[in-house]
Image (spheres, rainbow, N blue to C red):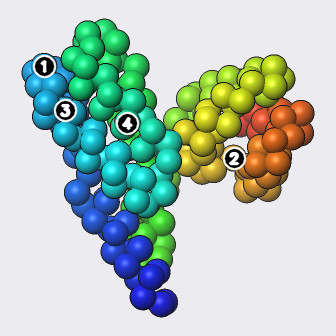
Amino acid sequence: MDGDQDLYLQVLRMFVDHTRDDGAKLLTLLGEADWPAAERLAHSTKSVAASVGLKALSEASRELEGLLRVKAPPESLQGPAQRFVQLLDDALRTVAHALAVLDGQADLLPPLVVDQVACVADLQRLVRLLRAHDGEALDVFEARSGSLEVALEQATFVALRKALSSFDFDAAATQAELALTQLQA
């Protein structure tokens, strides 16, 4: 490995080590109405996630940070906080598993487990958005791609990602429907 790859892997390891408990911390801070500390945590996660290429997590962190900065009412924080926690958990699980594979320790980990019911719901939403040619489909896919990649057959996931990256929403909808069939079989 060259130096850049080594550095990137070190940054990923630090990401896992330093954010492992941040989902639970955020929920505790929100429960205590400690908006400043919750805002700092969201800000920190936003920066770190962006630096390692976790765009959806960085965006969710940015949204949450903005709401906390303006002291938004607690009920308006629920959805963004849940999205933050879900994306963080997905990222941590996926990155930790990938690092274990690279370290030759994958056999010591339980297999990646995804919430199949959530994946089915995500795919159903994705199909609706794609059939409507709604650009939000790209955001939904990006936000849930970690779980979908684990849940779907590799060829189906790759074809879905390729169709989306080409903005071929009809082909992507067909692939998402195929993925739904595979998950529900």
Q: Nearer the viewer, residue 109 or 12?
A: 12
Cα distance in 3D space between marks 3 and 1: 9 Å
Residue 154 relative to residue 150: left or right: right
Q: Which of the two marks, 1 or 4, is nearer to us in this view?
A: 4
Q: Earlier in the sequence, mark 3 or mark 1?
A: 1
Mark 1 Cα shell of 10 Å, populated few (<14), some (14-19), many (≥20): few
The three-letter code of the residue at mark 2 reads Leu
Q: Nearer the viewer, residue 74 or 97?
A: 74
Residue 106, given in percent of the width and then of the height, sits at 45, 70
Q: Earlier in the sequence, mark 4 or mark 3?
A: 3
Residue 34, given in percent of the width and then of the height, sits at 11, 25
Contact (Cβ within 8 Å) of mark 3 with mark 1 = no
Mark 3 Cα shell of 10 Å, populated few (<14), some (14-19), many (≥20): many
Q: Earlier in the sequence, mark 1 or mark 4?
A: 1
The three-letter code of the residue at mark 3 reads Ala
Instruction: Give the residue at mark 1.
Output: 33
The three-letter code of the residue at mark 1 reads Ala
Mark 2 Cα shell of 10 Å, populated few (<14), some (14-19), many (≥20): some
Q: Is residue 150 above or below residue 131?
A: below
Residue 25 relative to residue 62: left or right: left
**Residue under the point 35% across and 45% down:** 46
Instruction: Give the residue at mark 4.
Output: 62
Task: Please tell me whether mark 1 sits on a helix, a strand or a loop.
Answer: loop
Q: Nearer the viewer, residue 60 or 148?
A: 60
Q: Earlier in the sequence, mark 2 or mark 4?
A: 4
Numbered mark located on residue 38 in the image: 3
